Image: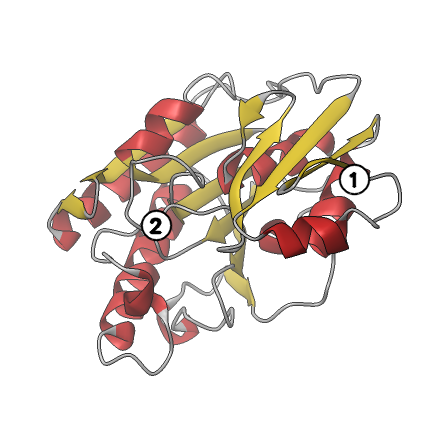
Amino acid sequence: MKVFISADIEGVATTLSHEDCRPGNPNYPYHCDEMTKEVLAACEGAMEAGADEIIIKDARGPACNIDSKVLPPCAQIIKGWSGHPFLMVEGLDKSFDAALFVGYHSAASREGNPMSHTVSGRPAYIKLNGQICSEFMMFSLCAASLGVPTVYLSGDQQLCEDSQNLHPCLVTTAVKAGVGGALRCLAPQKAQQLIRADVKRALSQPFQGKVPALPQHFTVEVCYKDHNLAAKNAFYPGAHRLDDCTISFETDDYFEVMRFFRFVL
C-alpha cells in the first residue's frame, strides 16, 4: 500500500502562536520535534495497516521542519517548494492508495485555532462554492481530483468538525481545541498514541474507490485583509473584483483553481 502524508505544524499538539512556528524562535525546535513525532506516529500506524511505501510532504514554511533521521526506511520526504500549484500536496499523483493529513489547522475566519489561516496570512477568508475553504479542504480535493481517497486528518477540533463530511471514509484525531487566543492541548504522548491508532484504523477500513465527486463548476472567492492585494490580484486572468477587498474566479477545472491559488495567496 502506497500512502501520501501532508504535514503542517499549526495543528500539532504543542503550538500556540505563529511565532512558535518560525525558524529562529527559541521554541521552534521543540515544535518541529512534535511535528516529527506526530508524522512518525502516522507512519507507524500506516505500516501496521500494511503500508510499505510512504511519501511525506513537509508542508510548513521553509518545508524542512521534520527530522528525517527518525523516519522509517519505507518513507521518503519532500522538502522545499518547487512552485507546483499543488503546494502542500506536491508529489501526490494517481499512484497512491490513500492520502493522510497531519497537523492541520482551522481556516482563516474560523475560531478553532489562534493560528487559523488559509495558505498565508493575507486572506481574511476564502470560499469555494460558497463554503469557507480550509487548507485541508483545498488540498484533499486535489487528492479527490486524482481519484485518491483522503482517509485521515489530525489537527484542531474545529477543523475536524468542519471537515467530517468532506470525505466518506475520513477518520479524524483532534489534538487541540481553541477559543479565541487560547488552546486546550492533549499531552504530546497521548496525541501521538491516538494518531498512530487512528491512522491504522483509517487504513484498515474498506476505503478503496471511495472518493467524493467533485463539482462540475468551481466559484472561488478570496477576501483579503488589505485592499491593495485585491486591486493587484484582480489582474489574474479570469479573476474579477467583487468589492474593495474581494476577488472571484470561476472554472470547471480544479487544477485551475489551484493554479489561481498559487498566484494570488
How many C-alpha atoms fall within 10 Å of the one at disc 1: few (<14), some, or many (≥20)?
A: some
State left or right for residue 167 relative to residue 26: right
- Image coordinates of residue 75 in percent, x first then y, are 50, 60
Is 151 placed above or below 18 here?
Answer: above
**What amino acid type should be assigned to the residue bearing mark 2?**
Glu
- Residue at label 1? 255
- Residue at label 2? 44
**What amino acid type should be assigned to the residue bearing mark 1?**
Phe
Write the residue at 37% across / 34% down: 110
What secondary structure is marked by label 1? helix
- Image coordinates of residue 225 in percent, x first then y, are 52, 49
Q: Quadrant of residue 258?
A: top right
Is 111 placed above or below 206 here?
Answer: below
Q: CA distance from mark 1 to mark 2?
A: 32 Å
**Viewer-side label of 1, 2:** 1
User: Which residue sits furthest right?
Assistant: 237
The quarter in which the N terminus is drawn is: top right
Q: Nearer the viewer, residue 194 or 187?
A: 187
- Image coordinates of residue 119 in percent, x first then y, are 54, 51
Q: How many marks?
A: 2
State left or right for residue 164 relative to residue 221: left
Write the residue at 34% across / 43% down: 45
